[in-house]
Image (cartoon, helix red, strand yellow):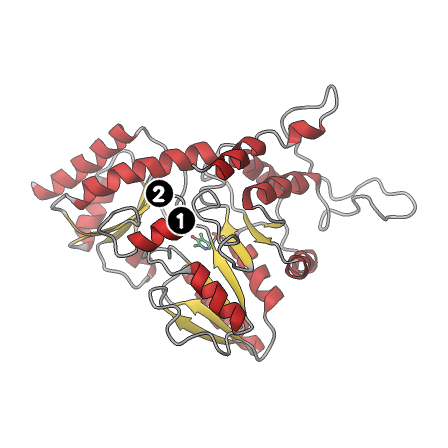
């Protein structure tokens, strides 16, 4: 981890400590109140639970230190993505999205935004810049893409989009700010699902928007107030707690993935592998340039759907589940949701188990396939 990320990780644990008075709880209190004591002139005080909550304030303070930018918290990643898109787009404008990114972003664009007169254009992440950005008002990037783990050059795209007069948004869910900092690469806005690694315990859904552009931040905040897409205080409190261990968990997960990926790549039951940290991966050179870690996701292909299922269910330390980024390693065949990937493609999310145990378990399950 570089010095800047180390400082952020240390600061995150002591933000609240800077404002405590004698006798205050060190841990963040959970405030669940719709009403606030508000006699007379309402200026300058918490007023109503759709607009103000001290537990959100503490969470957004932590998120803003993590992102190095003001943040607005949302009740899910999709709520954050909706806020970012509805706050930036107008009828008659053009939105460019990945054809191979998170599928619900595509559904939202095709089923709802297009009905309000937004033209939606799709391109694969590999080749996202092909065709240029003239006439693109908002470019929405996912790199590495979920689930294919393709990359695109975020800085080059953000620069070209800005030159063409557009706005760039990056979905940074797969990396978190400890692995990649798109705002420092020049993009206007970051969105993320905190349901994944930031929450980290598979017990909450949350998301956030981060931006250094005051007008965009105000628009996103207004969207939250008026649409009512507000986080529940309990989920905000859980996420605040999760953020305090994100650095430790993310570090373990990325280190383990770096040990597991080469071992899987050499196994005869695996026909293809994607992991940006492998020197043989087509995205490796770009990953080294724009990411500070290679992440904890590995894309594996086995030769059939049945073999892929048998691999997953044959592992003791792997939960067969959708979603990723939790303490517990998990995996699933993405073709079961209709993603445009091979039937035997498995997205593996490396968790926090001690790596020797996890690796031995994965290898045993793969070896068993070969002896059948
Ligand atoms: C999970 C995910 C989302 C949606 O997040 P929710 O918290 O489930 O709403 C968006 N983008 C990516 C890349 C994701 O993996």
Give how far apart the Cα atoms at labels 1 and 2 are.
13 Å
Circle nearer the viewer, 1 or 2: 1
Residue 315 appears at what percent x and percent y? 24, 37
Q: Quadrant of the C terminus?
A: top left
Q: Secondary structure at mark 1?
A: loop
Taking the spot 57% from the left edge, 37% from the top edge, the residue there is 240
Q: Is residue 67 left or right of residue 45?
A: left
Q: Quadrant of the N terminus?
A: top left
Question: Dot 1: few (<14), some (14–19), or many (≥20) neighbours within 10 Å?
Answer: many
* Label 2 CB sits under 8 Å from any ligand 1 atom: no
Say which of 309 and 102 sits in front: 102
Q: Is residue 138 visible?
A: no
Residue 291 appears at what percent x and percent y? 40, 49
Q: Is residue 250 visible?
A: yes
Q: Quadrant of residue 228?
A: bottom right
Q: Secondary structure at mark 2?
A: loop
Q: Is residue 255 left or right of residue 178?
A: left
Please say if 14 is above or below 217.
Answer: above
| Farthest-out residue, left | 371
Cβ–Cβ below 8 Å for labels 1 and 2? no
Please say if 36 is above or below 121.
Answer: above
Residue 358 appears at what percent x and percent y? 27, 32
Residue 141 appears at what percent x and percent y? 45, 62
Taking the spot 29% from the left edge, 39% from the top edge, the residue there is 258
Number of numbered labels in the structure image: 2
Taking the spot 46% from the left edge, 74% from the top edge, the residue there is 133
Say which of 247 and 28 sits in front: 247
Instruction: Give the residue at mark 1.
Output: 291
Q: Earlier in the sequence, mark 1 or mark 2?
A: 1
- Residue 296 shows which numbered tag? 2
């Amino acid at each position: 981890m570089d010095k800047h990320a180390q400082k952020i990780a240390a600061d995150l644990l002591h933000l609240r400590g800077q404002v405590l008075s004698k006798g205050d709880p060190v841990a963040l209190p959970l405030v669940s109140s719709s009403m606030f004591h508000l006699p007379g002139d309402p200026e300058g005080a918490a007023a109503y639970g759709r607009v103000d909550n001290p537990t959100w304030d503490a969470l957004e303070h932590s998120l803003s230190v993590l992102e190095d930018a003001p943040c607005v918290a949302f009740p899910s990643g999709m709520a954050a993505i909706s806020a970012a898109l509805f706050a930036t787009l107008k009828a008659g404008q053009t939105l460019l999205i990945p054809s191979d990114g998170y599928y619900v972003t595509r559904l939202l664009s095709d089923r709802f935004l297009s009905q309000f007169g937004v033209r939606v254009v799709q391109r694969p992440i590999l080749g996202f810049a092909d065709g240029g950005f003239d006439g693109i008002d908002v470019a929405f990037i996912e790199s590495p893409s979920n689930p294919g783990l393709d990359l695109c050059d975020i800085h080059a795209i953000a620069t070209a989009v800005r030159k063409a007069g557009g706005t760039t948004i990056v979905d940074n869910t797969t990396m978190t700010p400890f692995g990649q900092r798109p705002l420092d690469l020049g993009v206007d806005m970051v969105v993320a699902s905190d349901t994944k690694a930031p929450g980290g315990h598979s017990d909450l859904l949350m998301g956030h928007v981060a931006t250094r552009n005051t007008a965009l931040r105000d628009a996103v905040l207004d969207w939250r107030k008026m649409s009512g897409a507000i986080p529940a205080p309990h989920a905000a409190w859980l996420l605040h707690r999760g953020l305090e261990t994100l650095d430790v968990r993310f570090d373990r997960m990325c280190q383990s993935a770096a040990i597991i990926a080469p071992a899987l790549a050499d196994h005869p039951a695996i026909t293809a592998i994607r992991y940006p940290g492998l020197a043989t991966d087509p995205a490796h050179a770009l990953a080294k340039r724009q990411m500070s870690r290679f992440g904890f996701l590995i894309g594996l292909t086995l030769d059939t759907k049945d073999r892929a299922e048998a691999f997953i269910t044959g592992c003791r330390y792997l939960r067969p589940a959708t979603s990723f980024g939790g303490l517990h390693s998990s995996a699933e065949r993405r073709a079961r949701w209709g993603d445009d990937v091979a039937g035997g493609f498995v997205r593996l999310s490396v968790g926090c188990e001690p790596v020797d145990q996890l690796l031995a378990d994965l290898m045993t399950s793969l070896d068993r396939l070969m002896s059948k």
